[in-house]
Image (tube, coloured by chain):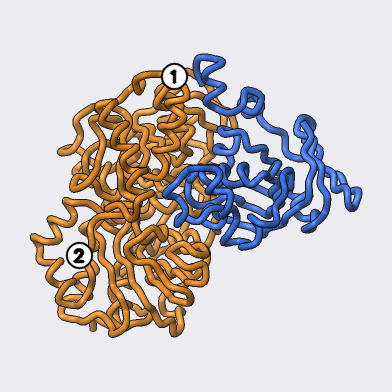
Amino acid sequence: MGMTIAEKILAAHTQTAGFQPGDIIKVDVDVALANDITAPIAIQEFRKSGQARIAHPDRVVFVLDHFTPTKDIASANQCKYVRDFALEQEMEHFFDGGEAGVEHALLPEKGLVLPGDLVIGADSHTCTYGALGAFATGVGSTDLAAAMVTGQAWMKVPSTRKFVFKGVLGPWVGGKDLILYLIGKIGVDGALYRVMEMEGPAISALPLSDRLSMSNMAIEAGGKAGIIAADAKTLDYVKPRATRPYTVYQSDPDAVYESVTTFDCTDIEPQVAFPHLPENARPVSQAGDVRLDQVVIGSCTNGRIEDLQVAARIIRGQKVAKGLRCLILPATPSVFRQASREGLIDIFLDAGAIVGPPTCGPCLGGHMGILAKGEKGLATTNRNFVGRMGDPASEVYLCGPAVAAASAVTGRISAPQEVVK
Amino acid sequence: MIFKGKAYTFGSDVDTDAIIPARYLSTSDPDVLKLHCMEDADPEFPNKVKPGDIIVAGKNFGCGSSREHAPIAIKAAGVGCVIASSFARIFFRNSFNMGLPIFESDEASGAIRGGDMVEVDADSGVIRNLTTGARFQAKPIPSFMQELIADGGLMEHIRKRGSI
């Protein structure tokens, strides 16, 4: 019987033969990731185990990216706790200060996640790496502690739902729009416990950055992983970065899927997800008159150089609407540097935007762009739950970088075509 | 093990930001987190909840962030167990890993009202609404997960057995 990519990667990382969806198996972990919010609990649990050293220190990655640059004394203490542990364990892959970036933008850039890897991360958006052809899934801090002690994790073998994207994308439509559209169709638990495998001509045509945006939001449909098979574009990105061997898997033609759903993308417009769930996606033309107080462009979903390039094409020569704060947060130091070299930072500053350091900050209502009671924010981030970006009585709308940039100029949710004639 | 308490009901898709908002995540101290448990879904919940009370929710409870602070806050608030139509997968595994009892039952989720007295037999998975007399059967828990509960969570399981 044929196998899916997910099944092949699980099989390559377990001693259990002939497993079926629903079975619980032990897997060897290639990469185990945590951040400044989730690592402290993992470290406490690791300490309790009594084990002196991490089982495979080269496979554990800590990134201080959520409440950094530290927002208050408590978060500073939390970061110090993680930093002290990383230094004590002589962790090679510890990212702090000017080396830190938003974790799911940083790890692919550093070549730390490769096709065929089995990755767990104490961060729900670990599923981002599915776009590299890896099996990557979010777990809790205790899972991470277990991986630090044993090098392993337990997995319930998921079934796979396949989503095929046909057609050619319209102007200003990108990966973020496709994933919001998909979540709008299947709902926030439409792929609960399942692997989402995404393919088709529209996916093949996307740059890797847009595929990473799509896999990033698999969790917003409840998915365990959001896998896109590695192709020539993936390998162009991976090859110069990889420092260890990797394996490219393809699903077999007779692989068993729980379901196969096909979308024609030709008529899909840029999407906006309304409060307070990512499934509330609408075409931007049906957004109505939503006046905005803040626009955020950044995050593990859309803080890559390609996202900033799209935003700059729209903002160039324009001004941010009066009374609106536009925050642009390049996701990693190297994205920031490239944006600077390409003149994008000047374009943003000339327009009156705020350009900030790489951080998850506002996405989870941590810091650097918190909404007041009654305010409305539009963001290229991934969640619009109640209180996600600040006061429980604020609202978050989600979109891709093109709609975000256009809306920053007009002051209300707008199609890019309104600004770029 | 028997859980018995008053039901507090919530809707579907209760996310971990509602269970414990990120603005409180600069600590993982259970005694601090419990003060804000469910705050963005029901600001009064931390003041109302009594030890042994039971959360009853719709589908996809615990969706969103992987923060273990969510089950920690629920446990520290004194909640005995959570019943839902379904759980988001990271919350599901976190609960077993750290010993928060959870039960899946669509029927119980739909039939239990806020304020009802509820009893759950963890071994049989039988849920009783003591207020109405209704009886429900929770979905069976896979044997590995039962081991995790019996051992007192994932780390204790590893300590006792030498591996996962």
- Marks 2, 1: nearer the viewer: 1
Closer to the camera in the image, B135 or A183: B135
Q: Is residue B153 visible?
A: yes
Residue B32: x and y in percent read 53, 48
- Residue at image point 56% right, 21% down: B157
Q: Which residue is mark 1?
A: A50
**According to the rendering, which colour does chain B have?**
blue
Residue that badge 2 annotates: A309
| Dot 1 amino acid type | Gly
Badge 2: residue crowd in 10 Å (few <14, some 14–19, many ≥20):
some
| Quadrant of the image occupied by residue B126 | top right
Q: Secondary structure at mark 2?
A: helix
* Mark 1 neighbour class, 10 Å CA radius: few under 14, some 14 to 19, many 20 or more: few
Relative placement, left or right, of B100 versus A408 is: right
In percent of width and height, residue A29 lies at 39, 28
Chain holding disc 1:
A
Q: Amino acid at mark 2?
A: Gln
**Viewer-side residue, A284 vs B64:** B64
**According to the rendering, which colour does chain A have?**
orange
Q: Are marks 2 and 1 in contact (CB under 8 Å)?
A: no
Q: Is residue A162 above or below residue A292?
A: above
Residue A308 location in percent, x, y?
Answer: 22, 63
Q: Is residue A193 visible?
A: no
- B77 relative to B121 in the view: left or right: left
Quarter holding the C terminus of chain A is: bottom left
Q: Chain ID for label 2?
A: A
Residue B130: x percent and y percent? 88, 47
Taking the spot 69% from the left edge, 48% from the top edge, the residue there is B84
Relative height, residue B23 to residue A395 (above, below) = above
Report the residue at 77% width, 38% height from top.
B3
